[in-house]
Image (tube, rainbow, N blue to C red):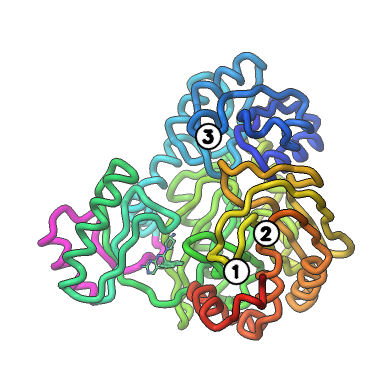
Amino acid sequence: MIQKVLIANRGEIALRIVRACRELGIKTLAVYSEADVQSLHVQLADEAICIGGPKSSDSYLRADRIISAAEIADVDAIHPGYGFLSENAKFAEQCESCNIKFIGPKSKSIKMMGDKAVAKDTVRKAGVPTVPGSDGPVDSENEAVRTARKIGYPVIIKAVAGGGGRGMRIAHNDVSFAKEYHVARNEAEKAFGNGAVYIEKYIEKPRHIEFQILADSHGKVIHLGERDCSVQRRHQKLIEESPSPFLTSSLRKTMGKAAVKAAEAASYENAGTIEFLVDAKGNFYFIEMNTRIQVEHPVTEEVTGIDLIKQQIRIANGEKLEFDQGDIQFNRHAIECRINAEDPARNFIPSPGVIDLYYAPGGPGIRVDSHAYSGYAIPPYYDSMIGKLIAYGPDRKTALGRMYRALSEYYIRGIKTTIPLHKAIMSDPVFIEGKATTAYMEEFMARTPTDLFS
Ligand code: MV4
């Protein structure tokens, strides 16, 4: 039985995990960097150990120090949160071999899904639709060009070790393909130490829709519906909502079944996400699986009433899922806005510094997941997300209205944030009508004067 958990993360997700553990009667150990001494997760955990300097590479990415802290404090399990070591198969394996439960999938699943070509091949063989493309990695320019021509331009070149949009190149003809192929290989080699790439038909202006999966260690897999994550900029999501305003109930059913099949094909265990691209005609294609809890998990929690972090811990404990697919109810609409310490009017330049006054919204249908408080100094070393504002209600209109109301109440003084941008998006007819694709943000920024959100 898990009695004490080390939280190998920082910020709002570390706090979120502390809260879930508290409710389960589980003790918590925070680890923190020298830049996070004043952080809330350090204050609220039962114990805390400093693991190194401010840079992630000296602290939150140091598997050796985190495992030492786990041994010293005698924890039973490690929750990796998202980012940092959460999708590092070697770290999960180290935990496993030290007899510390990794609250997440088995290292084998992380490894398999971390190779995007293997992941695609695995789910395709299980009957899940994938984007037409090369049969695995392409090994020479000759083979690559032949494949691109066969698929038909435009094509997209993706790194096998990539994911989340890193190391992708688009080509429209043989000439640009030859160039982009080499650029993609070199970038992938530099970024991941693995230059292998594969090729797919490029889907123009797709929607980005992902399904939340829960799988226990007894072979039961269910899905908790989808999240529409189409509103993103440079592969950073800004807004996520569920249900997707685009999906019909029949398409939702088909995609949910495909998502469960994909997770089963990977012998997946714990919480995970199956990402799909959906084109204008409603064709959907698996693109990758995320083998971690995601930033946007509260959207699903507010729609289904299921606490995903608690479920992760229960699953790591070897417990059976206590519900079947048919027990899951989807009777609310939820939407999340990511509140980043960035200036949207100045190309989203990071805006670290002291929050001299902080007041968070509340009232009906509002949830705030944030580690910020009055007097908190946002360190410049980590990503700029300082909180997530979630609004929910019986339908989309109510949820959007509450989101606008809550954004108007949210008061963060001393730094620039994405709050004014979110207010502008909540007032935008294209968004309100549910017509946002992955091209939405670029189009919105091009047609909207910056003074509307500065
Ligand atoms: C694609 C695609 C179009 N066609 N694959 C982005 C994140 C990563 N998980 C996969 N992504 C995409 N894969 C095919 N075959 C479009 C995206 C994509 C995207 C691409 C370029 C610029 C912005 C984008 C935003 C979302 C998705």
- Residue at 75% x, 37% y is 40
| 4 over 177 or under it: above or below | above
Q: Percent x, y for residue 169?
A: 31, 64
Task: Specify whether 159 is left or right of 45.
Answer: left
Quadrant for ligand 1? bottom left
Q: Residue furthest top?
A: 72
As drawn, the label of residue 416 is: 2
| 446 over 7 or under it: above or below | below
Magenta region: which residues?
127-152
Q: Percent x, y for residue 176?
A: 20, 71
- Residue at 51% x, 29% y is 58
Q: Give the spatial CA distance, label 3 vs label 1.
A: 28 Å
Whichever of callouts 2 and 1 sits on the residue coming sooner in the sequence is 1
Say if residue 26 shows up in the picture: yes
Q: Name the kind of residue labelled 1 in the image.
A: Ala
Cβ–Cβ under 8 Å for marks 2 and 1: yes
- Residue at 80% x, 69% y is 408
Q: Quadrant where the N terminus lies?
A: top right
Whichever of callouts 3 and 1 sits on the residue coming sooner in the sequence is 3
Q: Give the spatial CA distance, label 2 vs label 1.
A: 9 Å
Q: Name the kind of residue labelled 3 in the image.
A: Lys
* Residue carrying label 3: 55
**Element at badge 3?**
loop
Say if residue 311 shows up in the picture: no
Q: Tell whether position 142 is magenta.
A: yes
**Element at badge 2?**
loop
